[in-house]
Image (spheres, rainbow, N blue to C red):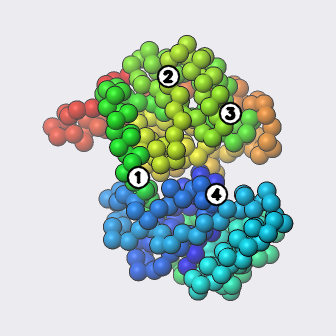
């Protein structure tokens, strides 16, 4: 079977628990995936073992073969000869897979078109997709009842052959070079707790103000934490502004996706809005503080890890890509974020003491 989930980062991560569950239920199946090239590091065949409760077969990766679909590049030059040639090559590659089922976990027109390129007569998708035209290209629409997108994905995967699946923690790829880089970075930072802050987020309405992130970064640093401010592509100035508002506390981190995965494995806490890196932290079981405004955390919020979500109940769900922060988002104060952060870090410290031999053991310094 083929999974079609082209992007974005958080969406690929939200689909993985369902496909991990499907792989666990059917370890001998051939499960392939169609994805945008930039998200390949999330799906590489060589992945770490999932958590013990997932009971995965370590001999098989979650995904066997990956089909790269540079749809974003094609959209820039839809009529170019190289685009047409690339689409024809993808079509031939997909048809060679001779898939007996396609699982469209994106629900967009472009994902539905990719599903159709396979020539497979069985295309499973949500009965209420993100983009209505995708419904017309689906042969088996599934009415999903789950509130969170992870649960909706599990319902879609369950429909492949009538399984009753439950989401499982995915194992994410381990890049040796990125791990070595991160080991050196963490060693330099000593044994202080590391907090990773993500001030970016899709569009302006979802972004908490930089001066408030700066206040949180400064207080965390004063309490003894090493605070790293992540800069996604094109967000270097945003991250630098946070450090400036923090009076020079914190460090801007510009990483590859492989490095971000390695770094997130080693942090004590992640703070950010509705962004891919926040969902990456959840996939790795890290405590997160989510700062939400126009997007609904019941649908797209943290899942599967310890978390606190801060959102004004007056905030309205709105995906309009406005530049100014949503009004409800502006009511969230740094003091509330700090309170949530301290609660999570205390819980993590208590849990590490419980699981250490004799209730002790080496742990990162307290905040």
Quote the CA–CA distance across marks 3 and 2: 19 Å
Residue 260 to residue 4: above or below: above
Residue labelled with disc 3: 207
Quote the CA–CA distance across marks 1 and 2: 26 Å
- In front here: 262 or 206? 262
Spot occupied by residue 91 in the image (x, y as percentages of width and height): 68, 78
Quote the CA–CA distance across marks 2 and 4: 30 Å
Answer with mark 2 or mark 4, whichever residue precedes in sequence.
Answer: 4
- At 77% across and 46% down in the image, what residue appears? 319
Answer with mark 3 or mark 2, whichever residue precedes in sequence.
Answer: 3
Quote the CA–CA distance across marks 4 and 1: 20 Å
Quarter of the image where one finds residue 314: top right
Q: Nearer the viewer, mark 3 or mark 1?
A: 1
Spot occupied by residue 220 in the image (x, y as percentages of width and height): 46, 21
Residue labelled with disc 1: 175
The C terminus appears in which quarter of the rendering? top left
The number of callouts visible is 4
């Amino acid at each position: 079977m083929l999974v079609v989930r082209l992007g974005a980062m958080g969406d690929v991560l939200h689909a993985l628990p369902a496909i991990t569950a499907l792989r666990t239920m059917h370890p001998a199946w051939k499960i392939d995936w169609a994805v945008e090239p930039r998200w390949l590091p999330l799906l590489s065949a060589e992945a770490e073992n999932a958590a013990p409760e997932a009971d995965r077969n370590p001999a098989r990766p979650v995904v066997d073969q990956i089909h790269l679909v540079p749809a974003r590049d094609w959209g820039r030059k839809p009529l170019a000869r190289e685009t047409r040639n690339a689409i024809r090559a993808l079509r031939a590659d997909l048809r060679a897979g001779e898939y007996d089922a396609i699982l469209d976990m994106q629900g967009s027109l472009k994902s539905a078109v990719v599903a159709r390129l396979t020539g497979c007569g069985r295309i499973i998708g949500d009965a209420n997709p993100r983009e209505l035209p995708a419904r017309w290209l689906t042969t088996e629409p599934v009415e999903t009842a789950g509130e969170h997108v992870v649960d909706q994905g599990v319902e879609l995967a369950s429909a492949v052959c009538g399984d009753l699946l439950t989401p499982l923690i995915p194992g994410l790829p381990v890049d040796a070079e990125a791990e070595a880089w991160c080991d050196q970075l963490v060693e330099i930072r000593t044994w202080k707790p590391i907090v990773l802050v993500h001030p970016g987020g899709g569009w302006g309405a979802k972004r908490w103000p930089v001066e408030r992130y700066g206040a949180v970064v400064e207080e965390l640093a004063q309490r003894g934490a090493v605070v790293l401010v992540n800069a996604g592509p094109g967000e270097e100035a945003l991250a630098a502004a946070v450090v400036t508002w923090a009076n020079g506390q914190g460090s801007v981190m510009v990483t590859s996706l492989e490095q971000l995965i390695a770094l997130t494995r080693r942090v004590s806490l992640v703070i950010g809005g509705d962004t891919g890196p926040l969902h990456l932290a959840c996939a790795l079981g890290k405590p997160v503080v989510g700062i939400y405004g126009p997007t609904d955390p019941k649908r797209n919020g943290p899942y599967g890890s310890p978390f606190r979500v801060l959102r004004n109940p007056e905030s309205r769900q709105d995906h309009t890509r406005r530049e100014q922060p949503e009004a409800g988002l502006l009511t969230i104060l740094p003091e509330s974020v700090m309170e949530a952060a301290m609660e999570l870090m205390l819980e993590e410290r208590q849990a590490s003491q419980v699981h250490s031999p004799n209730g002790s053991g080496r742990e990162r310094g307290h905040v």
